[in-house]
Image (spheres, grey):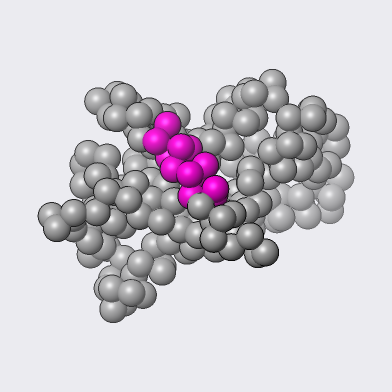
Amino acid sequence: MFSPSLCRANLCTYHAAVPGRWASVAYSLTGGNALEWFRSICGGVDHDILLAELGREPSPVLALPYLTPSGTPWFDGRTGGALTGLRLATTRGDILQGLLEGVAYEMRLNLEHFAAAGLSIDELRATGGGARDRRLCQLKADAIDRPLVLLDESEAGCLGTAAAAWAAFIGANSAAIASAWVRPTAIIEPRSAHRSAHAERFAAYTRQYRALADLAQETFPSC
């Protein structure tokens, strides 16, 4: 749980709300902001219009989604975002899809660090605003190559706070309350037809980060 490899990957471990349990946080500081940023530079186009332009195949655009400093595992404030693979035929949907896949690849990278530290992830659950759009969930499942479980209540933070408060109020076991309140509704499976392509693109993604991090070090050595 407190392995040196977790420390090297900046994956902190905290006491969970349930006694005897622990929690670790892996995250991208850009995350869903990538969609909002792209929407803003496209003149405020409606989300549904933009998401309807996502392709069925992996995007030809490979994105490093560091529109803010990176989150785990690098905590890199120097390396900026980047888009590679642009052509005259590149569409707005290609660029957006590349950005969203880049965020998912960042999570895939964090999952690899957890695995290297000996922590198995049994299940991934989608929460928040993005969990309400099946297209986004499918994109993430494909890029991460793991099933995503959808819940009947997507705002997990609010539900968890309410569950913890209710458990304390009635003196019940918080884990039992959570099990009763959290109800999975669907599983989004990664599409096997895209597995090989995403594996190749994820490998390219990690190489792209190392190359751009070296370039940023040379260009902005004092940052």
Main structural element of the magenta stretch: helix, strand or loop? Answer: helix
Q: Quadrant of residue 42?
A: bottom left
Q: Position of residue 184 (x, y in %)?
A: 50, 37
Compared across the picture, whether 148 is left or right of 198 comes to right
Split into 4 quadrants, where in the image is the C terminus? bottom right
Q: Which residue is at a point 78% across and 54% down the rendered structure image? A: 165
Q: Name the outermost residue toward the front.
A: 218
Asked whether 89 or 211 is in front, the reply is: 211
Q: How many circles with numbers are drawn on the protein?
A: 0
Q: Is residue 93 visible?
A: yes
Pick out the residue farthest to the bottom: 43
Compared to residue 124, the image places residue 120 above or below, namely: above
**Residue 13 versus residue 133: which sits nearer the camera?**
13
Residue shown at the point (44%, 43%) measured from the top left: 208
In this view, 109 is above or below 47 = above
For residue 217, side relative to residue 133 (left or right)? right
Q: Is residue 30 visible?
A: no
Q: Give the quadrant of the N terminus.
A: top right
78 sits to left or right of 3: left
Query: What segment is highlighted magenta in the picture?
Result: 202-214
Q: Residue at x 59, y 63 (%)?
A: 220
Relative depth, front residue between 16 and 158: 16
